[in-house]
Amino acid sequence: MRFFDPDGAEYGIPTYPRRLAPDGLATRRQLRARGLRPAGQDVAAQILWHGRRPPGERTRPVRAAYLYRIDLDAPVRPMTPGRWRAVHAMLRARRTCPACQVTYPYVIPRSLGCCPGCADPVALAA
């Protein structure tokens, strides 16, 4: 069976194919759904699978998901008022144009680097 290496001889850490990981291990998303976090522990195992083939490519990429032991996890830290203020400040910075200093109700595209109005001065002149 491809990607089945429970001893870690081939890949360095125990490796399993999709849906065949043993009980007691979970990905970060699965931990978060249970209200847990890895709490600084090292990766215990991994899941490998073939992803979708990109258009024009001949081979499919190998994708990986890292697994952590559930018994070593800790509860997620609660959001304090200070952490909420920090998150809101970060989101406000992503909505503020660095050129005109206007705060918009949407996130400014990183590809433009500023609001669409500042990025296209021809549209402002019209």
Image (cartoon, grey):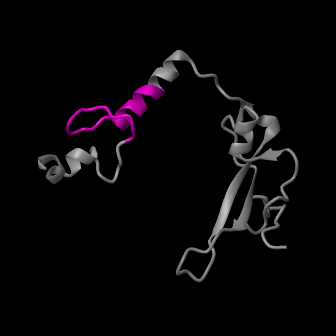
Residue 14 x %, y % = 79, 58
Magenta extent: 87-107
Label count reads: 0
Frontmost residue, 121 versus 3: 121
Residue 25 x %, y % = 81, 46
Question: Per the image, is 48 magenta?
Answer: no
Q: Is residue 12 visible?
A: no
Q: Residue furthest top?
A: 81
Q: Quadrant of the N terminus?
A: bottom right
| Relative to 31, residue 76 above or below | above
Residue at 38% across, 34% down: 105
Q: Is residue 106 left or right of residue 54?
A: left
Residue 41 x %, y % = 70, 40
Residue at 42% across, 33% down: 91
Residue at 45% across, 25% down: 86
Q: Is residue 110 visible?
A: yes
Q: Is residue 70 left or right of residue 95?
A: right
Frontmost residue, 126 versus 96: 126
User: Residue 74's quadrant in the figure?
Assistant: top right
| Relative to 34, residue 84 above or below | above
| Relative to 42, residue 13 above or below | below
Question: Per the image, is 101 magenta?
Answer: yes
Q: Residue furthest right?
A: 23
